[in-house]
Image (spheres, rainbow, N blue to C red):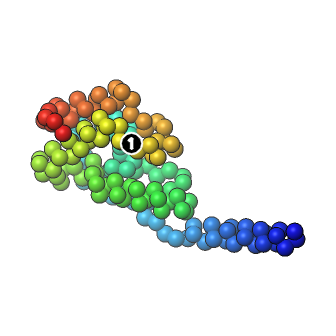
Amino acid sequence: MKNLRSIAKRSLVVLAVAAAAIQFVPVQRTNPPVDGEIPVPADVRAVLQQSCYDCHSNQTVWPWYSRVAPFSWLVVDDVREAREEMNFSTWTRLTPKEQAHYLREIRGEVEDGAMPPRLYLLPHPGSRLTAADRATLVAWTKSAGIEGER
Protein backbone atom coordinates (compact mmCIF):
# COMPACT_ATOMS: atom_id res chain seq x y z
CA MET A 1 0.00 0.00 0.00
CA LYS A 2 2.87 2.36 0.84
CA ASN A 3 4.39 1.67 -2.58
CA LEU A 4 1.07 2.53 -4.29
CA ARG A 5 0.90 5.89 -2.46
CA SER A 6 4.46 6.65 -3.46
CA ILE A 7 3.67 5.95 -7.11
CA ALA A 8 0.55 8.11 -6.91
CA LYS A 9 2.49 11.00 -5.35
CA ARG A 10 5.21 10.77 -8.00
CA SER A 11 2.59 10.69 -10.73
CA LEU A 12 0.93 13.83 -9.35
CA VAL A 13 4.29 15.61 -9.16
CA VAL A 14 5.08 14.65 -12.76
CA LEU A 15 1.64 15.86 -13.89
CA ALA A 16 2.04 19.15 -12.00
CA VAL A 17 5.49 19.74 -13.50
CA ALA A 18 4.20 18.91 -17.00
CA ALA A 19 1.18 21.22 -16.56
CA ALA A 20 3.49 24.03 -15.45
CA ALA A 21 5.98 23.37 -18.26
CA ILE A 22 3.40 23.50 -21.07
CA GLN A 23 2.47 27.01 -19.95
CA PHE A 24 5.75 28.16 -21.52
CA VAL A 25 4.81 26.93 -25.00
CA PRO A 26 4.09 30.18 -26.86
CA VAL A 27 0.84 30.82 -28.70
CA GLN A 28 -0.04 33.78 -30.88
CA ARG A 29 -3.21 35.49 -29.67
CA THR A 30 -3.30 38.24 -32.25
CA ASN A 31 -5.81 40.77 -33.46
CA PRO A 32 -4.43 42.12 -36.73
CA PRO A 33 -5.69 45.50 -37.88
CA VAL A 34 -9.21 45.63 -39.29
CA ASP A 35 -8.69 46.00 -43.00
CA GLY A 36 -12.19 46.78 -44.17
CA GLU A 37 -15.19 46.02 -42.03
CA ILE A 38 -18.24 44.45 -43.59
CA PRO A 39 -20.81 47.17 -44.37
CA VAL A 40 -24.02 46.08 -42.63
CA PRO A 41 -26.97 47.70 -40.86
CA ALA A 42 -26.60 48.27 -37.11
CA ASP A 43 -28.92 45.39 -36.15
CA VAL A 44 -26.92 42.93 -38.26
CA ARG A 45 -23.63 44.28 -36.89
CA ALA A 46 -24.88 43.76 -33.34
CA VAL A 47 -25.71 40.10 -34.04
CA LEU A 48 -22.41 39.51 -35.83
CA GLN A 49 -20.44 41.10 -32.99
CA GLN A 50 -22.33 39.12 -30.37
CA SER A 51 -22.13 35.72 -32.05
CA CYS A 52 -19.52 35.69 -34.80
CA TYR A 53 -16.70 38.21 -34.32
CA ASP A 54 -14.75 36.33 -31.64
CA CYS A 55 -13.75 33.76 -34.26
CA HIS A 56 -14.52 35.36 -37.63
CA SER A 57 -12.91 38.79 -37.24
CA ASN A 58 -9.73 40.51 -36.12
CA GLN A 59 -11.63 41.79 -33.08
CA THR A 60 -11.42 38.62 -30.99
CA VAL A 61 -12.02 39.02 -27.27
CA TRP A 62 -9.58 36.46 -25.89
CA PRO A 63 -11.06 34.73 -22.83
CA TRP A 64 -8.97 33.97 -19.75
CA TYR A 65 -8.64 30.31 -20.69
CA SER A 66 -6.94 31.30 -23.95
CA ARG A 67 -3.91 31.95 -21.75
CA VAL A 68 -3.86 28.49 -20.14
CA ALA A 69 -2.36 25.55 -22.02
CA PRO A 70 -3.57 23.24 -23.42
CA PHE A 71 -6.84 25.21 -23.85
CA SER A 72 -4.88 28.12 -25.35
CA TRP A 73 -3.67 25.87 -28.17
CA LEU A 74 -7.22 24.85 -29.03
CA VAL A 75 -8.66 28.37 -28.87
CA VAL A 76 -5.90 29.94 -30.94
CA ASP A 77 -6.16 27.18 -33.54
CA ASP A 78 -9.96 27.50 -33.73
CA VAL A 79 -9.73 31.28 -34.24
CA ARG A 80 -6.99 30.88 -36.86
CA GLU A 81 -9.09 28.35 -38.79
CA ALA A 82 -12.23 30.46 -38.53
CA ARG A 83 -10.44 33.58 -39.78
CA GLU A 84 -9.02 31.60 -42.70
CA GLU A 85 -12.49 30.32 -43.54
CA MET A 86 -14.13 33.76 -43.41
CA ASN A 87 -13.06 37.02 -41.78
CA PHE A 88 -15.43 39.97 -41.44
CA SER A 89 -12.44 42.28 -40.82
CA THR A 90 -11.11 41.67 -44.34
CA TRP A 91 -14.47 41.64 -46.11
CA THR A 92 -13.63 44.55 -48.42
CA ARG A 93 -10.72 42.56 -49.91
CA LEU A 94 -13.21 40.09 -51.36
CA THR A 95 -14.57 40.32 -54.87
CA PRO A 96 -18.36 40.65 -55.23
CA LYS A 97 -18.47 37.00 -56.32
CA GLU A 98 -16.59 35.92 -53.18
CA GLN A 99 -18.84 38.07 -51.00
CA ALA A 100 -21.91 36.45 -52.56
CA HIS A 101 -20.41 33.02 -51.87
CA TYR A 102 -19.84 33.88 -48.21
CA LEU A 103 -23.31 35.36 -47.85
CA ARG A 104 -24.75 32.06 -49.11
CA GLU A 105 -22.51 30.21 -46.65
CA ILE A 106 -23.61 32.44 -43.78
CA ARG A 107 -27.25 31.96 -44.68
CA GLY A 108 -26.86 28.17 -44.84
CA GLU A 109 -24.97 27.96 -41.55
CA VAL A 110 -27.53 30.15 -39.81
CA GLU A 111 -30.53 28.32 -41.21
CA ASP A 112 -28.99 24.94 -40.33
CA GLY A 113 -28.13 26.08 -36.80
CA ALA A 114 -24.48 25.16 -37.36
CA MET A 115 -23.11 28.49 -36.18
CA PRO A 116 -22.01 29.27 -33.59
CA PRO A 117 -20.80 25.73 -32.87
CA ARG A 118 -22.23 24.00 -29.80
CA LEU A 119 -18.79 23.55 -28.25
CA TYR A 120 -18.23 27.32 -28.47
CA LEU A 121 -21.60 28.01 -26.86
CA LEU A 122 -20.78 26.06 -23.70
CA PRO A 123 -18.49 28.79 -22.29
CA HIS A 124 -20.21 31.57 -24.32
CA PRO A 125 -23.98 31.15 -23.86
CA GLY A 126 -24.54 34.82 -24.70
CA SER A 127 -23.41 34.10 -28.24
CA ARG A 128 -26.34 31.80 -28.93
CA LEU A 129 -28.44 33.02 -31.86
CA THR A 130 -32.08 33.56 -31.00
CA ALA A 131 -34.82 33.02 -33.55
CA ALA A 132 -34.90 36.81 -34.02
CA ASP A 133 -31.11 36.90 -34.55
CA ARG A 134 -31.37 34.15 -37.15
CA ALA A 135 -34.19 35.98 -38.91
CA THR A 136 -32.13 39.19 -38.92
CA LEU A 137 -29.14 37.45 -40.51
CA VAL A 138 -31.22 35.56 -43.08
CA ALA A 139 -33.11 38.75 -44.04
CA TRP A 140 -29.77 40.55 -44.40
CA THR A 141 -28.34 37.87 -46.71
CA LYS A 142 -31.54 38.01 -48.78
CA SER A 143 -31.42 41.80 -49.03
CA ALA A 144 -27.78 41.55 -50.07
CA GLY A 145 -28.88 39.66 -53.19
CA ILE A 146 -28.82 36.05 -52.05
CA GLU A 147 -32.47 35.26 -52.77
CA GLY A 148 -32.11 31.93 -54.53
CA GLU A 149 -31.72 28.43 -53.17
CA ARG A 150 -28.46 27.58 -51.45
Where residue 138 appears, as percent x and y from the top left, is 25, 32
* The C terminus - image quarter: top left
Residue 133 appears left or right of 41 = right
Q: Residue at x 28, y 51 (%)?
A: 87
> In this rendering, does residue 44 appear at all?
no
Residue 135 appears left or right of 28 = left
Where residue 36 appears, as percent x and y from the top left, is 23, 50
Quarter of the image holding residue 40?
Answer: top left
* 117 or 1, nearer to the observer: 1
Q: Residue at x 33, y 50 (%)?
A: 57
Residue 136 appears left or right of 124 = left
Above or below, 91 against 9 in this view is above
Where residue 81 appears, as percent x and y from the top left, is 34, 58
* 40 or 111, nearer to the observer: 111
Residue 70 appears left or right of 111 = right
Q: Residue at x 37, y 50 (%)?
A: 55
* 4 or 146, nearer to the observer: 4
| Label 1 element class | loop
Quarter of the image holding residue 46?
Answer: top left
Amino acid on which disc 1 is placed: Pro
> How many residues crowd around disc 1 within 10 Å: few (fewer than 14), some, or many (20 or more)?
some
Residue topped by disc 1: 116
Where residue 82 appears, as percent x and y from the top left, is 34, 53
Above or below, 130 against 35 in this view is above
> In this rendering, does residue 17 appear at all?
yes
Above or below, 12 against 60 in this view is below
